[in-house]
Structures are given as C-alpha cells and as structure tokens.
Image (tube, rainbow, N blue to C red):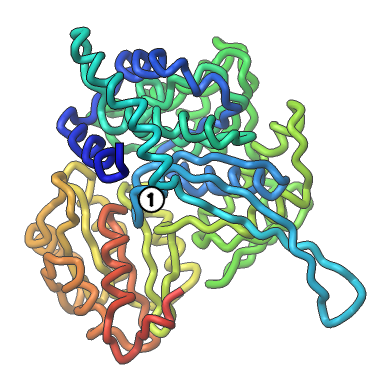
Amino acid sequence: MTYQEAMEFIKASNQYGSVLGLESITELLNRLNNPQDNLRIVHVAGTNGKGSTSAFITNILAAEGYKVGRYSSPAVFSYREQIQIITSKDQQYDKNITSLKNTVTEITINDITEEGISDAITEIEPLCRKMVEDGLSHPTSFEIETAMAFLYFVKQKVDFAVVEVGLGGRLDATNVIRHPICSVITSISMDHMQFLGNTIEKITEEKAGIIKPGVPVVTNNNRVEVLSVLEKVCASRESQLSLTLQEELCDIHYSPEETTFLYHGKNYRIRLLGNYQTSNAILAIQTAEILRRNGVPVSDMAIREGLFHTKWKGRFEIIAKKPYIILDGAHNEDAALQLRNALQTYFPDKKFIFIIGVLADKEYRKILQIMLPLAKIIITVTPMNQRALPSSKLAIESKAYGAERIFDADAVDHAAQLALQEAKADDVILAFGSLSYLGELQEAIVSSSSPFLRPDQVD
C-alpha cells in the first residue's frame, strides 16, 4: 500500500469507534505472530502525567545508549508523532577553551516514517479484512495503530519500548502486553468515568489492570484510596510495588527556563515546566532504579541527562515570549488544579489571557471553576473533534467568573488573532482544555503578523 492508501484505511477504521476490550486486538496480533512478545516493554498507565513520565523514561534509556521505541496518544501536532524512535549520542566540547572535556547527550527523536506506516498497514489490512470474513469484528483505528507500533518497533530492532495506555488499562488495547519488564502507574484521578467507573477505587482497579504476575510496579500515587487498591492487586499477582519517596524531594527551584531539585540527595534539572513535573520526574528516576536492580544497566549520568533533555509538546510548553504563550493539555479537574498551581508559581500576581476549547464529555465546569478566576480575558474555541463543546456554549458558561472580557472566537485561527491583538508584551497567553486543537493553534501563532510576535521568536 502507498502511504496515502494506508492513511485512508486507518481513517476509515474510525467508523468502528472506540471499543474497550482485548478480543479484537488479541486476534489481530495473533495473526501477526505477536510482535509485542519480542519486545522489552515499560508499560505506563494513569490519569495525568502518562505522557511526561513516558518521555522522561524514554530519554533516560536513550541517554544510556539504547534505541527506544515510544508509543503514545493522542497525536497533537503530527499523526506520526504517536510512534517514535529515540536515540542519543554523546557530543564533546571544550568549556571556556580549557582542556577539560564535557560530555553532553544529544537526544534524537524520529517519528515513524511514511514507509513504516505503509509497510505495517500492508500487513495489517488484509488480516482485518479476513477477520471480518471470519465473522469477527473489524479492529478499531486505535487497535490498528497499536499493532502498527509493535510491528514498527520490532522492525527497527529497538532495545526497549515505552508504551502508554490509551484509556484505562485493564481493557485497553495495549494490555495485550503479556510480559512487560516494568509497569508504571502515574497520578490517578477522576476522568473517563463513563468508561472506568465513578469512584477513585474503581478507576484505580481499571488502571491496575496492566499489572502482570511477578512484574515490578512503580507509582507516585500517595492517596490512601489509590494505594490500597494497588497494594491489593500487587499482592494478588506477587508483584513488588515501589513508591516514590515524596519526602526526599526537596530544594526545588522554579524558573520559566528550568526546574532544579534534589532527590535521594542527588541534584537534577528538568526543562519540562509545571510544579507537578517534579513528581513525574522522580517516578521516572524510580523506574530507572528498578530497571537497574533487575539487570538493565542505567547510569546516574544517563538519568540526569535523560531528564534534562526531555521535551514534551503541549504540556505547559512555552512556545513564545513577549508575550509568553503557553500550551497545555489540561482536560480534567486534577490537571486543571496542577495547571493553576504552575501558573501561580511561575507568574505570581498576574491575570491571564485564556484560550479555551473543551470536549463536551469532560467535566469542563470544574475546569472553568478552577481556572477562570485567574483570567482577565477569555477566548473560547470549538476544537475540531466530534465530541467538542461549541465555543458559544463555553462562552456562556464562562460568564460567571468575572473576566473583563469574553470572546467567542469559534475558529482556532481567529482565537490566535484575538489573543495577540489583546496582549501586551508582558502578558501571558495560555491555551488549554483539550490537546486536540493545540497543534492548529501553534500553526496559527507561527503564521501571525502580530507586532509583538514574529515567526523567528517562536521556539
């Protein structure tokens, strides 16, 4: 198949919706000879922090010199970014023109190639057709993409794969992974209740579904309700549970450029911003230490370098300054609380220009209640998503929170124009609510003719 034909097949598979369950993906992978069984996989589940934690773990392994595959969702800026190959090399340079050599790791991230997609779908498409002929369900697009990731990682001969759960855990398509080398559970909170349950305990049970017998588990959750479920599941499956030690996280210093901190008495620097990122970082550190105890060589230097060189698009990402423009995918109550705390940490005593677009099936009223008291101007958009809440309704909902002005922009490019027209050089523009429109917004900003912002000012 050509790349275009492969993409048309994946797009057409969206008609089969989003189906939780392992029957279809298990059948498809059986017919592909189970490529996932030939990979050493770190499996990551949770409500918030999956993407950042996965990125940290991936880069730590890459900094050690391993070739690492990474599978994450959803795509924000490019479809192909969901499946990546990450490698590194050491660069030598002279500091202050002295004879002392310093080693700096250069991390290289390559999205799956067009050829990689076409080759994988050439294998997958006839098997999907045969499944239907055999009276079975056609795999969903996410199941097809999951199979594609495994095929691509095997073909690329990765040393490790870091695989992020799509939704939940127990019934997520990625849970066909039978023998991960480590299971990682990030922060768990209330989200996707219509699929996962309406209590934190039920949601945790679903996330804990990725835990496999005898496989070590690492988490940064310290809520009693969450820990009690994780401890019970780990005990039943004879899996050792390791907790990050929040009390050993100290000496934290924040700036818009980087965050520095001490953990286990060692110094670290990260450039992923947000005061919640230290928790994700120490979860990645703990995971690396668990892997090391289980025979995977990972040096302290690789941990430091991997953390420092990690970037993750759309997560409190500063894309421009004067004015500051920040993109963040906060889309549930817990993420909104973390985002508010980050804003107050980095930009105290400021009022903000908010661009907001949300999905109607999210608890957007709680997000608005948390975030909008910080706003001086609110601009609402309708994300390009069939689940999107219309911007007009979002604007009406926003009126209760006392912003000076509210604009119903509808279109993302119009919202970018409005924000830049209203902003002064020392203002902060924040776009949040859903990852689904952030890529389009960044494109609109880059092409803007704002007197404050030129394309060469955008990072």
Left/right placement of residue 216 relative to residue 121 reads right
In the image, residue 298 above or below residue 27: below
Residue named by callout 1: 335
Find residue 11 and report its horizontal and vertical position in percent: 21, 39
In the displayed image of the protein, which residue is found farthest to the bottom? 451
Find residue 188 and report its horizontal and vertical position in percent: 43, 36
Left/right placement of residue 111 relative to residue 270 reads left
In the image, residue 14 above or below residue 447: above
**Would you say residue 294 is visible in this rendering?**
yes
At a point 72% along the width and 46% down the height, the residue shown is 64
Q: Amino acid at mark 1?
A: Ala
At a point 10% along the width and 56% down the height, the residue shown is 390
**Foreground residue among 74 and 218:** 74
Q: How many marks?
A: 1
What crowding class fits label 1: few (fewer than 14 Cα within 10 Å), some (14-19), or many (20 or more)? many
Identify the image quadrant of residue 441. Answer: bottom left
Label 1 secondary element: helix
**Foreground residue among 333 and 49:** 49
Find residue 440 and report its horizontal and vertical position in percent: 26, 63
